[in-house]
Amino acid sequence: MTYKYLGLRMFAHPWSGDALSGYPPAVGSALRDIARLNAGLTRRAEEHAAALGTDGSSDFSVVLINRMGAADEVDALDRRRGLKTDPDMGGAKVRVSWHADSCLEHFSTIAVYHFLPTENTNQTKKNEKIESGWRVALRVQRDAEGPNAGRSRRAGVSDLTGGVPSQKVDMGASGSCYYMLGDFNHDHQHAVLAGNCERISSTHRVGKREGHDAGLVLDKTRRVLAAAKRCPKQWASEGRALDELEFEWLRQWFVQGAAHAALHAPYWADVIAETQALWTRLEAREALKVRMLENAARVAAARGLGLGSEPNPNSNPSPNPGRTSPTRRERKHADAVAQVGGAAAYDVVLQALRLRRDKRRGWGIRVADKMWDKLPEPFRPMPLPLFDDAGADNGEEERLPEDLDGVISDIERWKAAYLRDSGGAAAGPNPNPDPSPKPSARPQPNPKKKKKKFKKKGQPNPNLNPNPKPNPKRKAMPRPKKNRKEGKAKK
């Protein structure tokens, strides 16, 4: 399971199953503790939901653990950077800005467990309470999330709060918990106001599975690869599947560094390897499509020069000695492009490649950000192994270059030539080079031709079938009855 927050995909550690055996014993024990905490919060959330009569799931599937420093703690990455203050909250310092939780099942419950290490270590008397200063701020924000997210803003509503003032609530002692149930997260935002000590929060959520569960994504990709159809929809589906694996999973994994990969290896190493293998197969299909488009343009040009669809050794030499008749493979590719839609096939591939080029440029800018220089080396982006020899699981797999500008220019040129040489329409498979109409498959009778007459008896007529088949609809002539005793016909 994963969770995407502010454009970064977070890869979760498992808290049960065989994958725990790959972790150090202390880490495995801590993950099991989180599983027990999650089960307890699930039961209490269901009780609260039943008491309030709210709908929505409380079956928490993902847990986010955050460590937050005190209000006066110096930023480890940038000592000059401090916390923002909120004027509506009396100038309080904000550790987590206003937001509504995203990537969740609609109407699902959110539970937040609050832990203060300082209170648990320094507490000398039982039930002694330390004023930590940590508070949660709440405000109305119509259509902040949920099925109608952004609807009020798009409708031009000027005051999304409805005039309701913001509120702040003390989080209480270490071990306290608060819940957001039903549609609360849809129409409200919350923020965390910094306290005077360290705080650790454990937020339990019902995450979306579609697009965030690796098993579902890989199964969908396998179905796309297994589809035998050859049509624009299938070509587009393969392009979208490749983009999802590359930009939502592989780049998200490698950008987080070698230390992140090592910490998550017990569960995620095999998943990422399989994701990369599926990406390689899809990339090989994209390269094959480009080769098909090139060959289709070549075949269309050859037909325009009168070279025909089949080489004829007895024909006159081509007026263009630099041109040869298309090969069997080129003709096969041209037929496949025509089956996909001819000129429409070029548009499908161009649209996918342009979008992929723009996304790769965006990731290039993201990886080149100087912010990474502030992090230790193990936490900086790793090289992406998709476009070198080490990234291929099969030496025979063909791949396009990472920079797609040249490929896009070639396809645009091939498309123009294809439209010109095919008359501006999709060239159908195996076109007839002879401009005369094709003869009908069914022979037509010639009214001028008369059947030859035969007058002599006993002479066979060649126009008749010597072995006619019996007609089941025709009744047979009655045979004369025989006398059983004499074995002769009666007179």
Image (tube, rainbow, N blue to C red):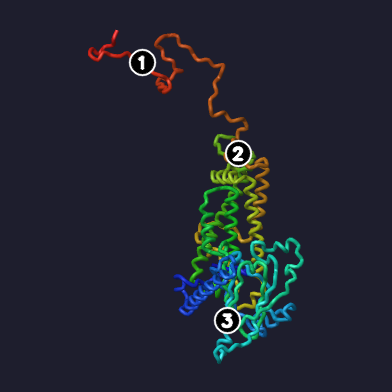
Label 1 secondary element: loop
Q: Amino acid at mark 1?
A: Pro
Residue linked to disc 2: 307
Q: Residue at image x 64%, y 66%? A: 363
Residue 307 vs 286, above or below: the answer is above
Which residue appears at 53% of the width and 57% of the height? 220
**In the displayed structure, would residue 450 be above or below residue 198?**
above
Q: Which residue is mark 3?
A: 115
Precedes in sequence: disc 2 or disc 3: 3
Q: Quadrant of the N terminus?
A: bottom right
Mark 2 secondary-structure assignment? loop
Q: What kind of residue is marked 2?
A: Leu
Residue 20, given in percent of the width and then of the height, sits at 46, 73
Where residue 60 appears, as percent x and y from the top left, is: 54, 69
Would residue 43 be visible to someone looking at this image? Answer: yes
For the residue marked with disc 3, what is the amino acid? Phe
What residue is disc 1 on? 478
Q: Residue furthest bottom?
A: 124
The residue positioned 58% from the left and 80% from the top of the image is 176
The answer to which image quadrant residue 387 occupies is bottom right
Tag 2: Cα neighbours inside 10 Å, few (<14), some, or many (≥20)?
A: many
Number of numbered labels in the structure image? 3
Q: Secondary structure at mark 3?
A: strand
